Amino acid sequence: MKDTNQQFEEVIAICRELFIKKLKDYGASWRIMRPTSLTDQIFIKAKRIRTLETTGVAMVNEGIRSELIGIINYGIIALIQLEKGYADTVDILPGEAIELYDKFAQQALNLMKAKNHDYNEAWRDMRMSSYTDFILTKISRTKEIESNNGATIVSEGVDANYLDMINYAVFGMIKIEFGA
């Protein structure tokens, strides 16, 4: 039996390592981004995955794996921005950025554990293209909520959609990394 929790943590470790390297290169420059811009950044990555899935042709020397890592990291950054608000300048040190990264990665893991229990690992039998479509759907929902200034009547908020995007991207990474 494959251990989804362990695989999830291994994928997050890959993403976290890149996050830390980029933090060293750029600092927390993403603090300037508003959540709506982060939603669009995730959209760009998901659209590229869909293009790669449908055409099989990449003109840029990066594949689906790197885009999934981007969705995971930008999703976590978006959750940080929702909590802290955006800034006009870089206003946090790398240590705080990493602590916040870990906090929201743990939230995504906790959500995955709960849903994975209830859905009994159904994601393992899904197609990679479905993860892409679900991420794009979550982005569309997020944009709608953002257009309504965060107001919903019966639906989950933007944060829940970001968490789902992260988790679908993690599932895709697990399939790539472990052939699950």
Image (cartoon, rainbow, N blue to C red):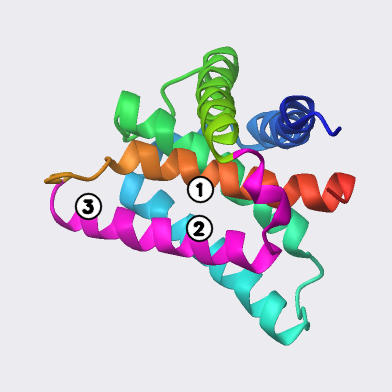
Q: Which residues are magenta?
A: 120-149
Helix, strand or loop for disc 3? helix
Q: Which residue is mark 2?
A: 135
Q: Residue at x 16, y 44 (%)?
A: 154
The mark that comes first in sequence, 2 or 1, is 2
Q: Is residue 2 above or below residue 50?
A: above
The amino acid beneath tag 3 is Ile
* Residue, disc 1: 165
Q: Earlier in the sequence, mark 1 or mark 3?
A: 3
Q: Residues within 10 Å of mark 3 (few under 14, many from 20)?
A: some
167 and 38: which one is in front?
A: 167
**Total marks in image:** 3
CB within 8 Å, label 2 to label 1: yes
Q: Is residue 74 above or below residue 93?
A: below
- Whether residue 154 is in magenta: the answer is no
Please name the residue shown 42% across and 39% down the image: 78
The alpha-carbon separation of the residues under discs 1 and 3 comes to 15 Å
Residue 30 visible, this angle: no
Coordinates of residue 90 in the picture (x, y in percent) = 44, 29
10 Å neighbourhood of mark 2: few (<14), some, or many (≥20)?
many
Task: Return the mark for residue 145.
Answer: 3
Q: Is residue 124 magenta?
A: yes
